Amino acid sequence: MGHMSRISRRISGIAPSATLAVDATAKAMRAAGQDVVGFGAGEPDFPTPDHIVVAAEKACHEPRMHRYTPAGGLPELREAIAEKTARDSGVTVPASQVLVTNGGKQAVYEAFATLLDPGDEVLLPAPYWTTYPESIRLAGGVPVDVVTGPDAGYRVTVEQLEAARTKRTKVLLFNSPSNPTGAVHSPEEVRAIGRWAEQAGIWVLADEIYEHLVYGEARHSSILAEVPELAERCVIVNGVAKTYAMTGWRVGWLIGPKDVVSAASNLQSHATSNVANVSQAAALAAVAGPLDAVAEMRTAFDRRRLTMHRMLTETPGVRCPLPEGAFYCYPSLEGVLGRNLRGRTPATSAELCQLILEEVGVAIVPGEAFGTPGFARLSYALSDEDLVKGVGRMSALLAEAS
């Protein structure tokens, strides 16, 4: 009899979240008394707005919130999300086509689990958010990287997508504004990609979680608003995490055609049942309320974006396009690799990021986590003072490379 592995192949094949790992290392060093500046976490450094917290407190005292509620979400929240989607994205859907999930991650996972059969391919523009390929593989799918570089501002083109398409391509994953690069596709680019997908007969999974975090001239455009003909083959995932500083509340959603939403709801009814009712009540206050909180965050993020970009651009060996959305810079560190730095010669961005953390107490996430080695992601969702201190230390260190 063959020896059976203790852990299933499916699960042992998952790479741990590199972003959470960097964050954990930074926290451990801090706990040991070291002064560490962490650029790893992908979350706003603002508290959840008061009116949202108050709505949650109120919900705690409602007996109906102490019971099971429909697995697909509180009817009033699904209704509010449908209204919010029409308002913010220009996409009209009935509440019945909204599924409330435990954060954006569950929405992504359930979308792939619902759409993919073993061997189906997903076009995945890289650099990509570290969870996407894992969700695709868990569903039996095959991620096909479509790599974009700093020269293109990390924006994928129809030509690249067409070159990567095969008979087995079933889905394109589209994330604009992008994590990790901050790239925002123009309405024209979004429309061209949507039309291409529609003509090619492939699905689009659009992750719009950073929709409200755009700067300068950039505007977010929803692919379904640009190409309404995609309605029967488009799934949108979104959530309250980034817009309302609610990462810990765990409320996201998936919007799609009736059959997909019904199948994903069925999966969720067995996997998790309803999202915590108190979190749903908080999300209801968020999506039905004003966007003042995000406007305030956007002002701070915009200022930090410009500061970080300037400091990175002034660092020898570093190249960085100006991000137009989300709250990340994604510099190329290729010009520093293979050079002597304090007696060491880092050959990869993973080694360089480790060296930066050990030598100057600055935590950044290596590009290996996002499908493009040689790069790194830095979040600018931290105080202006810490940002300048951290990037300053890193710049001074990299300037020593010989």
Image (tube, grey):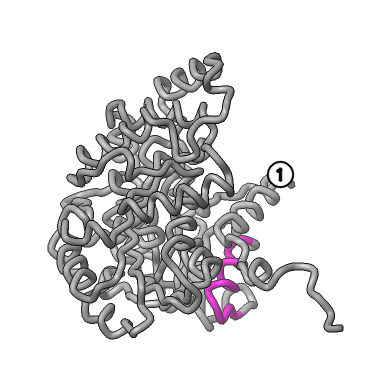
* Helix, strand or loop for the magenta stretch, by majority: helix
Counting from the top left corner in percent of width and height, residue 128 is at 42, 66
- Considering depth in this image, is 100 or 349 the residue closer to the camera? 100
**In this rendering, does residue 395 appear at all?**
no
Counting from the top left corner in percent of width and height, residue 149 is at 33, 75
Q: Is residue 9 left or right of residue 101?
A: right
Please name the residue shown 19% across and 63% down the image.
Answer: 190
Q: Is residue 336 left or right of residue 160?
A: right
Counting from the top left corner in percent of width and height, residue 371 is at 46, 73
Q: Hey, which quadrant is residue 232 in on the image?
A: bottom left
**In this rendering, does residue 48 appear at all?**
yes
Q: Residues within 10 Å of mark 1 (few under 14, many from 20)?
A: few
Q: Which residues are magenta?
A: 345-357
Secondary element under disc 1, as helix, strand or loop, is helix
Counting from the top left corner in percent of width and height, residue 17 is at 58, 60
Please name the residue shown 25% across and 35% down the image.
Answer: 83
Indicate whether residue 352 is drawn in magenta.
yes
- Considering depth in this image, is 77 or 212 the residue closer to the camera? 77
- Placement of the N terminus among the 4 image quadrants: bottom right
Indicate whether residue 273 is drawn in magenta.
no
The residue that label 1 is drawn on is: 31
- Considering depth in this image, is 384 or 40 the residue closer to the camera? 40
Please name the residue shown 48% across and 70% down the image.
Answer: 367
Q: Among all residues in the image, which is located at the extreme left?
A: 188
Q: Is residue 133 left or right of residue 303?
A: right
Of the residues shown, which amino acid type is indicated by label 1? Ala
